Amino acid sequence: MKIWVDADACPGVIKEILYRVAERLEMEVVLVANKLMRVPGSRFVRSMQVPHGADVADAEIVRLLAEGDLVVTGDIPLAADVLAKGGFALNPRGEFYTEANIAQMLTMRKFMEELRQNGVDTGGPAPFNQADQRNFANALDRHLSRHAKRAN
């Protein structure tokens, strides 16, 4: 199992959690972004820079993703593609995208996009906070306990 990170918009504190997990479990974590990403010197953490463009990083993650891999992303269409390919998708606030909730999330995303296109101020997501960080760490830990082979 690998952990793929849609890294352009991923909060730094989430990346730090993932770096620690990579070392602790000796698990590969790959950050994919349109810009050069600095990562700690680790044989388990690497970054991959892709060309600039809409959804280029998303397409590369989906292309390289293996069944059972985990993708950390806040991008709902990417999460849908990950689920369709047999992967798991977790957002930085600690919520898993699932077959049960992805259709509703895609519909809501499209609705909000239409509102914005018609000039409606929909606001934005709530600021990322420590509760989100804890929720992510807890959800990640539960997932890895169930799905990852721990190094002995």
Image (cartoon, helix red, strand yellow):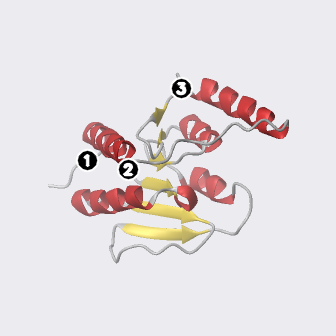
> Farthest left residue?
152
Residue 112: image tag: none
The amino acid on which the numbered mark 1 sits, given as a three-letter code, is Lys
Q: In the rendered image, which quarter contains the C terminus?
A: bottom left
User: Cα distance, mark 2 to mark 1?
Assistant: 8 Å
SS class, disc 2: loop
The amino acid on which the numbered mark 3 sits, given as a three-letter code, is Glu
SS class, disc 1: loop
For the residues bearing labels 2 and 1, Cβ distance under 8 angstroms: yes
> Picture coordinates of residue 126 (x, y %)?
52, 42
Give the residue displayed 29% in from the left and 45% down from the top. 148
| Residue 1 position (above or below residue 139) | below
User: Cα distance, mark 3 to mark 1?
Assistant: 24 Å
The residue that label 2 is drawn on is 1
Give the residue displayed 26% in from the left and 64% down from the top. 23
For the residues bearing labels 2 and 3, Cβ distance under 8 angstroms: no
The amino acid on which the numbered mark 2 sits, given as a three-letter code, is Met
| Residue 71 position (above or below residue 11) | above
The residue that label 3 is drawn on is 99
User: Cα distance, mark 2 to mark 3?
Assistant: 20 Å
On the picture, is 8 further left or further right than 114?
A: left
The residue that label 1 is drawn on is 149
Task: Give the camera-side residue of 92 and 85.
Answer: 92
| Residue 80 position (above or below residue 4) | above
On the picture, is 148 further left or further right than 78?
A: left
Give the crowd class for mark 2: few <14, some 14-19, many >=20 residues within 10 Å.
Answer: some
Nearest-to-viewer mark from 2 and 3: 3
